[in-house]
């Protein structure tokens, strides 16, 4: 079993020895290894059962710590970095030869993120290399927002989980590609499109990538599977098709008539999308072992973090 503690020294020692450590970030927990050590990175793919065509995000504490990884920051980076980093945004940028091809799945670009979680920052500052880290779940499953979620899926395979409490954002980072002439958002996440547009003073394109158009190759349509079928969309319509007694529900701020109370997850009674986002993955997990046949999930308002919530629920609903 993995140790679950908050000791930065112990985590750093393992990482220095080329081992994996699960780390807390403000978005979700990551499964980290020395990004410059190909052997260590290979273990990430093995441990998660992750296909090697799916590139990893590299985590650094500051732009300076990432300087040797990036060939050209381009004209948009500094503005975004000053406003949103550290925080839930990853930047896709042209990579230098220092970044192993395994990390980027052979792409000429690397995704870089500067996490805000204080324990994660302390760890990054204690290391003299950046950390490659995907979300610390088995491939295709729901991302972990607490140390115990990591333990459930990966506890047998890794030695140490650095416990930083509950992830405050709860959705993975927003990924923005800055490697071509115009920025493109590749994955909606913990930072809203509106905030990015606002910062740059222009409308940034969002290209939803899929397995047939793998701009962000990890964006397969089926993902975030809670192990129980999810019906996403119009709640009223879906309600008519199910046996309410064996149904779970995920809704924004209102309760659903006819579904037993303890099978309902109302993500934010005060209708706050940030709060809802932070509770989504926990809600998806929470139905396991409850004799539920189907989870009905309502469509959230298509604005702010609501877009990223809808994206995750849609993927969770693809079997
Ligand atoms: O918040 C997050 O981003 C979390 C925490 C741990 O930092 N990490 C995370 O990693 O969500 P992961 O591996 O579950 O998703 C990363 C996705 C990949 O699936 C891929 O789509 C995209 O990032 N990506 C990574 N490198 C890329 C690149 N060079 N070009 C395009 N997309 C890339
Ligand atoms: Mg993931």
Image (cartoon, rainbow, N blue to C red):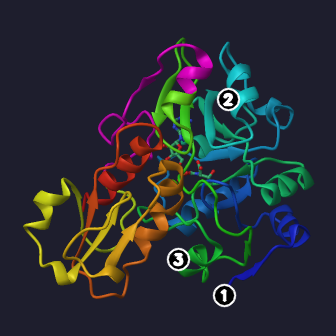
| Camera sees residue 96 | no
Place of residue 235 in the rendered image (x, y in percent of width and height, measured from the top left): 19, 59
Q: Is residue 237 left or right of residue 97?
A: left
Question: Quick check: 110 above or below 12?
Answer: above
Q: Main secondary structure of the magenta part?
A: loop
Residue 170, quarter of the rendered image: bottom right
Place of residue 168 in the rendered image (x, y in percent of width and height, measured from the top left): 64, 58
**Circle nearer the N terminus (2, 1):** 1
CB at disc 2 and ligand 1 closer than 8 Å: yes
Near-viewer residue (52 or 239) = 239
**Magenta part of the protein: which range?**
196-221
| Front position among marks 2 and 1 | 1
| Camera sees residue 65 | yes
Residue placed at 69% from the left, 56% from the top?
25
Residue identifier under label 1: 1
Report the Cα–Cα distance between label 3 and label 1: 11 Å
Q: Is residue 210 magenta?
A: yes
Report the Cα–Cα distance between label 2 and label 3: 32 Å
Residue identifier under label 2: 95
**Circle nearer the N terminus (3, 1):** 1
Label 1 crowd (10 A; few <14 / some 14-19 / many >=20): few
Residue identifier under label 3: 153
Residue placed at 20% from the left, 83% from the top?
246
């Amino acid at each position: 079993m993995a140790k679950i503690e908050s000791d930065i020294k112990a985590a750093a020692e393992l990482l220095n020895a080329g081992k994996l450590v699960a780390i807390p970030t403000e978005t979700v927990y990551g499964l980290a290894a020395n990004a410059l050590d190909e052997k260590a990175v290979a273990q990430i793919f093995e441990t998660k059962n992750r296909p090697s065509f799916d590139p990893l995000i590299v985590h650094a504490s500051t732009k300076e710590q990432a300087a040797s990884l990036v060939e050209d920051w381009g004209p948009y980076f500094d503005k975004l970095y000053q406003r949103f980093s550290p925080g839930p945004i990853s930047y896709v940028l042209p990579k230098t030869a220092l970044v192993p091809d395994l990390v980027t799945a052979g792409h000429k670009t690397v995704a870089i993120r500067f996490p805000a979680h204080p324990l994660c920052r302390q760890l990054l500052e204690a290391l003299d290399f950046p950390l490659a880290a995907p979300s610390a779940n088995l491939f295709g499953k729901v991302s972990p927002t607490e140390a115990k979620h990591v333990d459930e899926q990966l506890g047998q395979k890794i030695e140490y989980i650095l416990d930083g409490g509950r992830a405050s954002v709860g959705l993975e980072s927003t990924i923005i590609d800055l490697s071509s002439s115009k920025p493109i958002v590749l994955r909606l996440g913990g930072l809203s499109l509106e905030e990015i547009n606002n910062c740059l003073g222009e409308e940034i394109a969002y290209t939803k990538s899929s397995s047939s158009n793998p701009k962000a190759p990890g964006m397969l349509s089926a993902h975030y599977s809670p192990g129980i079928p999810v019906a996403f969309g119009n709640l009223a319509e879906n309600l008519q098709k199910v046996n309410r007694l064996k149904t779970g529900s995920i809704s924004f701020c209102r309760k659903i008539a006819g579904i037993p109370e303890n099978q309902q997850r109302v993500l934010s009674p005060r209708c706050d999308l940030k709060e809802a986002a932070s509770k989504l993955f926990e809600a998806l997990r929470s139905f396991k072992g409850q004799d539920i046949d189907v989870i009905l999930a309502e469509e959230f308002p298509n604005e702010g973090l609501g877009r990223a919530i809808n994206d995750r629920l849609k993927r969770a609903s693809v079997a």
